[in-house]
Each structure stands twice: as structure tokens, then as C-alpha cells.
Amino acid sequence: MLLSLKAVKEQWEPELFLAQLCEIEATHRQEVRLKRLLKESQLPIGKQLSQYYFSEVVGISAVQVKRKASELSWLRQGHNILLFGASGLGKTHIAAALGYALIEQSVRVKFTTGTAMVQHLQKAREGLGLEDALKKLDKYELLILDDIGYVKKSDSESQVLFELIAHRYERNSLVITTNQVFSEWDSIFGDNMMTVAVIDRLVHHAEIYQLEGESYRRKEAMKINGKSGQAS
């Protein structure tokens, strides 16, 4: 039933009708905003907290992640979250799920792989637009860099990644996932001095989680193979 017809039928006072109208408009605006935030975030589909099996990994809990999703002071202070662990433990899932939860609270989130971000910034630098590219990322309260350890970067690429981290230091938050421990980060940045500087900035205001367990993808593959064996 249209609101106006309902108001007439139930003989609402004008004040009640206006209040209901304002509430509907506010809800609509919030829905539109959330859709826009989700679209610009580029978060991978199907990565919700309820879909992650926290009981199968050691090093992080659902309570810890939910707390980060509800208490936004760490974002306002530009603090970081670092997720370490072997491939297949769900680091990307946790990072993305946190992003979805924060968007529900109207936080602007951007998800990207380390490789894609480096390529984007490198292209901007070649066009003399690195500073502008870094400033454009400031609109995102949270930037998620997924799998930064998978690419072996040239000196120029390492430099733009360093400049991104330095630019956001104590200003805007980062969530970083990687399967490489700090002692292996020289392979990412190529220079020990730069590696030390990056780690120093990241860990100064950060919570670090080391995930341990059996690869989820490996377990799924074993289940599939087991079913195939039984069928044959």
C-alpha cells in the first residue's frame, strides 16, 4: 500500500506522515550509498564472515574479526592489519569479509591485489601522476592489498609500493595479506633498507595475525578425489 493511501485510510496526523516519509527517504539513500560503496570496493563475491570456518585455523578468531568490523577507532587512527599464512588458509576471505562488514557501516573500502596496485601506480608514475594517484586513494578509509608477496618487483615497482605505504602511514588503514614472513620481504622490495623502512611503518600501528592450519583448497580437492574414487 502506498504511504499516502495508508495515511488517509488510518487518518494519520501530518507529523506522523512526514516522519514516515523521511524514514523511507533515509532508508532509500542508505541503500543507494551501500550499493555504490560495494561497487567501487571491487571486493570478491561470496566472502562473508559467516562463510569462513574459523574453527579450522589457528591464529585468528571470529570474535577478533567481528570486533574490528564494529569498533572503527583503528580506522580513524590509520592502523593496519597484517594477515600472514600459507596459501589456502583463507587470508583473502577474511580480508574481504572484513571489508564487507565495514561497508555496512558506510566505510569506504578498496580491494585490489598487490600486483594490480603496483601496475596502477607504476603507470601513474610513468605519466608523472603518482602523487595524484596516491591522493585519489585517500578517499578509501581502508585499502586491502591482497597477496603482495606473489610478485617479484623491479626497483621502480618496489619504490611505488613503498611510496603507497609511506603515504598512508598514520593517515589511512591498510589490510595486507601475504604468504611470506617478514624475513622474506627482501624478495618483494629488493633492497634491505627499503624493506626495513616498509616493515617499520606497517607494524608501528598494526595487529598481526599468523594463520596456521591445513589448506582449505587442498582439503576440498581431497574430498572431491575421494568421492570420485568411490564412484569409480
Image (cartoon, rainbow, N blue to C red):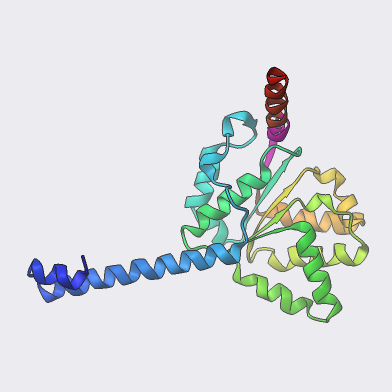
Q: Decide whether residue 211 is among the magenta residues.
A: yes
Question: Can you say which quadrant of the picture contains the N terminus?
Answer: bottom left
Which residue appears at 54% of the width and 62% of the height? 38
Q: Is residue 76 left or right of residue 221?
A: left
Q: Residue 167 or 7: which is nearer the viewer?
A: 7
Image quadrant where residue 153 sits? bottom right
Which residue appears at 85% of the width and 49% of the height? 185
- Could you say where residue 139 lies in the image, as x and y percent from the top left? 60, 71
Which residue is most to the front?
232
- Could you say where residue 170 lies in the image, as x and y percent from the top left? 65, 63
Q: What residue range appears in magenta?
A: 209-218
Which residue appears at 83% of the width and 81% of the height? 127
- Could you say where residue 121 lies in the image, as x and y percent from the top left? 79, 70
Residue 32 versus residue 213 in the image, above or below: below
Image quadrant where residue 3 sits? bottom left
Image quadrant where residue 25 sits? bottom left
Is residue 209 visible to us here?
yes
How many numbered markers are drawn?
0
Q: Residue 163 or 193: which is nearer the viewer?
A: 163
Question: Can you say which quadrant of the picture contains the C terminus?
Answer: top right
- Could you say where residue 197 lies in the image, as x and y percent from the top left? 82, 58
